[in-house]
Amino acid sequence: MEKVKVMIVDDSKMSRVMLAESLKKTNFEVCAEAKNAAEAITLYAETQPAVVTMDMNLPDADGIECSKRIMAYDPGAKIVMISAMKDASLIARGRDVGISSFLQKPVSANDLIDTLLLLCQQTVSRGQFLRESYVKPFVQALQSGLFDLVGLKAEMDLASDERRFLEVSGVAVIIGLTGDPVGRAVLMMDSETMKAFAALVAKKDAKDVADEDASDTVEESANIIVGRGISSINDVFKDKEMRITPPGTICGNSIRIASPRLTTYRITAKTEIGNIYLNVGFSEGE
């Protein structure tokens, strides 16, 4: 998915650095930084950002005047005012020149990203945003987790999964995701892969690993992998505080697991012992 360009306008270097850092691990990319209105107009024309964050106090013009000039150049410009002040008068003046949204310093990463997502929803759909910001950390967590746990190298694949039921033959570890957004992660593999995986962990032959021990091993590994994914998400969205619930494990043939009202993605790790799947879904009500 193509990055969404953001221009930061602020005379404070510290503020510019903080805003850029908030966007660092997201699908929003800082294409330009301006410390005054004159730079902002020039850089806007050069970089054509999808959205602008605008400080109120600039050395050569206030944020309202700077926004007015940008809107004169591009009436479709999307501008977010980020200021120490956020009163009714300021908002009214900003609305008059076409400023879209208003945030007050210090702005949280979550509020900033949610506001940019809302403004750029024609460019970034919710599904795309979930994929880039919430699902891809699980791809990395699964790949690195398999290598760190048992030395398995994996070729990774990520795809949308619109099935309302997951068909499982083997083992499935179900872990709830709480916070914002809520969801569910399911680590799955067939019985043969489960035994081979557990044998690698225990450093035994697969025939010497009991089924119960094998499923327990997969359960703990799933807990570690999903926990890593959530930790990566929390590093970006510091105030959402996502957490995982205790895992539940089921084993058997032709098991059906319902996926109602979830926007779901299927991560496949192709390894030498077989495919390992991580199904990650988030509530469609968010």
Image: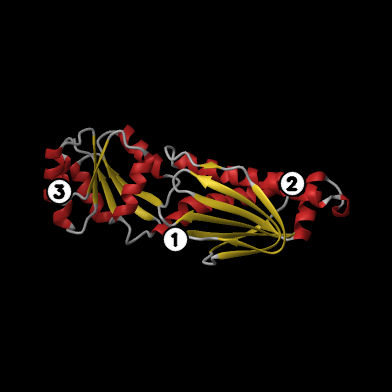
Where is residue 107 drawn, in percent x and y? 32, 37
Pointer 1 residue: 1
Residue 30 or residue 88, whichever sits in front: 88
Residue 162 or residue 139, whichever sits in front: 162
Mark in front: 1 vs 3: 3
Quarter of the picture containing the N terminus is bottom left
Residue 57 or residue 37, whichever sits in front: 57
Say which amino acid is labelled 1.
Met
Q: Closer to the N terminus: mark 2 or mark 1?
A: 1
Mark in front: 2 vs 3: 2
Where is residue 44 drawn, in percent x and y? 24, 52
Q: Closer to the N terminus: mark 2 or mark 3?
A: 3
Residue at 19%, 38% in the rendered image: 56
Residue at 54%, 67% in the rendered image: 163
Q: Quadrant of residue 246?
A: top right
Left or right for 250, reference 182: right
Q: CA distance from mark 1 to mark 3?
A: 32 Å
Mark in front: 2 vs 1: 2
Q: CA distance from mark 2 to mark 1?
A: 37 Å
Q: CA distance from mark 2 to mark 3?
A: 58 Å
Residue at 13%, 50% in the rendered image: 97
